[in-house]
Amino acid sequence: MSVQTSADSRIIQSVFQVLLISLLVLGSGRWILDELKSNESRLFQLYGIRQREAVFVTKEDQLDESCNVFEGQWVWDNVSYPLYTEKNCPYLVKQTTCQRNGRPDSNYQNWRWKPNSCDLPRFPPMKIFKAEEYNASIEYYWAPFIVESISDHATKHTVHKRLVNLDAIEKHSKSWEGVDVLIFESYVWWMHQPKINATFGDTSEVREYNVTTAYKMALETWAKWFKTKINPKKQRVFFTSMSPTHLWSWEWNPGSDGTCYDELYPIDKPSYWGTGSNQEIMKIVGDVLNRVGEHVTFLNITQLSEYRKDGHTSVYGERRGKLLTKEQRADPKNYGDCIHWCLPGVPDTWNEILYAYLLRSHSNSF
Ligand SMILES: *[C@@H]1O[C@H](CO)[C@@H](O)[C@H](O)[C@H]1NC(C)=O
Ligand SMILES: *[C@@H]1O[C@H](CO)[C@@H](O)[C@H](O)[C@H]1NC(C)=O
Ligand SMILES: *[C@@H]1O[C@H](CO)[C@@H](O)[C@H](O)[C@H]1NC(C)=O
Ligand SMILES: *[C@@H]1O[C@H](CO)[C@@H](O)[C@H](O)[C@H]1NC(C)=O
Ligand SMILES: *[C@@H]1O[C@H](CO)[C@@H](O)[C@H](O)[C@H]1NC(C)=O
Ligand SMILES: *[C@@H]1O[C@H](CO)[C@@H](O)[C@H](O)[C@H]1NC(C)=O
C-alpha cells in the first residue's frame, strides 16, 4: 500500500539555525543522490527545473508509535553506511567534507543509530521520485538566536560581539508564517560566554544577562509568537535540542589533555553527557515547550550526539572560510573544531529522525 503526502504539506519550508545547515543541505543532497543512484538523467531534471515532487511511503516505513527514537546505541554498520559519499554529493560545503579536507580515517561514517525498540526508516531510493502534483520548497533561515540580534546577516555577522533583542522576533517570524513545516534550533551561539549583552523593551538599554536567563526570555518571546501565529491544523513545528560539542578529551578520557581531534570511535558509556550540552538550557527548552503543548515536536538529539566525539570536523574543516593550513592542522588544540560535524555523519541521523516524524504524521492523517 502506498500513501501520498497530504495536500496541506505541499510546501515543505524549513527553518534551521546555525548547525543545522548541514542537515538541510543534506536533506536535499541525499534525495538527489538517491535519484542519482536510481536514474542519473532524472537528477538533472530535478535540480535544474525544480519540478514538483511526490513522496510515496509504504507501510513498513512507518514507525511504531511507542518507540523512543532517542534511546538506543550506535552500531557498527559499514554495509549500509555511509548513505552517500562526499564525492557523490556536490552540495556539501567545505566546512563539512572532512575526507576531501584530508581526514585520514573514515570510520566515523559507518555508525548507524539503532533505537532500542525499532529501526529508523531509510530514505529508500525507489520510493522518492518526482511527480507533477507536488510543489515543495525547502529553505534554510539564518537567525542564530531565533530572536533578533546583531548576528542576523547570514554571512556578514560578528562572532565575538553579541547583542540580542530578547523581545523582538517580528523581523524573522514574518518569514515563517504560513509555512507547512518549521524546524527550529538555537544553542551554540548563546554559549560564547556565561553572560551576554541584550536588550528587553528599550533597545537603547543594553544590559548583561546570564545566558540562561537571556535564553529563557528569548524562547518565551518565541513561544508567544507561536501561540498567536501558528495554526496547528495546518502547520507542523519541530524544535531541535542542542548539538553537543566535544572540546575537552578529559571528559570522556580522564587524565588526557586533548580535544576531539584524532578521536576514532563513539563513546560507549551509557548516558554519557559532557559539559558541551548545558543542562540548564535543556531544562528551559523542556519547560517552555511543555507550556506550548503538543503542537510542537521536540527532537531531543542531544544524548545520541553526545556519544559521537569522533564525528566532528576537527582540523579537517574551515576557519573563516578557508581550509586550515598545514601549520594550523598541526595544532589541533588551537585550531581543531569540535563543534561542527563532518558529513556524511551524525547530522544524517538527525535528518532520519526528522524524516521518521514526518512519515508518522503522514500516516496519522490517513
Ligand atoms: C531512467 O530514465 C529514463 C528517462 O526518464 C528512462 O527511459 C529509463 O528507463 C530510466 N532507467 C531506469 C533504470 O529507471
Ligand atoms: C566492515 O567491517 C568489518 C568489521 O570491522 C570488516 O571486517 C570489514 O572488512 C569491513 N568491510 C569494509 C568493506 O570495510
Ligand atoms: C508552488 O508553490 C508556490 C509557493 O507557495 C506557489 O506560489 C505556486 O503557485 C505553486 N505552484 C503551483 C503550480 O502550484
Ligand atoms: C557588553 O558590552 C560591553 C560594551 O561594549 C562590553 O564591554 C562587554 O564586554 C560586553 N559583555 C559581554 C558579555 O559580551
Ligand atoms: C547569574 O549567574 C550567576 C553565576 O551562575 C549566579 O550567581 C547569579 O545568581 C545569576 N543571576 C541571575 C540574575 O540569574
Ligand atoms: C532530552 O534527553 C535527555 C537524555 O535522555 C534527557 O536528560 C533530557 O531531560 C531530555 N530533555 C527534555 C527537555 O526532555
Image (cartoon, rainbow, N blue to C red):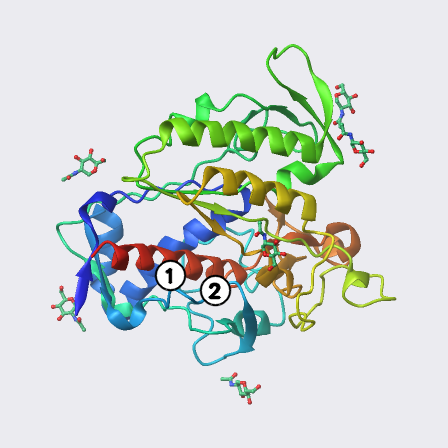
**CA–CA distance in space, label 1 to label 2:** 9 Å
Q: Quadrant of the N terminus?
A: bottom left
> What residue is at 70 percent from the left and 32 percent from the top?
160
Q: Is residue 221 above or below residue 62?
A: above
Above or below: residue 359 compared with residue 292: below
Q: Where is residue 128 in the image (x, y as percent from the top left)?
A: 25, 62
Which residue type does callout 2 highlight? Val
Q: Name the residue under label 2.
A: 69
Out of 61 and 51, give the one closest to the viewer: 61
Q: Name the amino acid, label 1.
A: Ala
x%, y% of residue 180? 30, 41
Q: Which residue is drawn at 48% across and 35% down?
A: 142
Q: Which of marks 1 and 2 is nearer the N terminus?
A: 2
On the rendered structure, is 218 left or right of 23?
A: right
- Figure quadrant of residue 60: bottom left
Residue 258 is marked as none
Residue bearing the label numbered 1? 356
SS assignment at label 1? helix
Q: Is residue 276 visible?
A: yes
Is residue 153 something that shows in the picture? no
Image mark count? 2
User: Where is residue 247 shown, x and y percent of the image?
Assistant: 74, 54
Quarter of the image where the C terminus is located = bottom left
Few, some or many C-alpha atoms within 10 Å of disc 1 (few <14, some 14-19, many ≥20)?
Answer: many
In the rendered image of this protein, does residue 144 appear above or below residue 279?
above
Name the one closer to the observer, 266 or 28. Answer: 266
Q: Position of residue 337 (x, y in %)?
A: 68, 52
- Identify the residue shown where x is 65% and y is 73%: 265
Ligand 6 occupies quarter: bottom right
| Residue under the image location 51 percent in, 43 percent down | 290
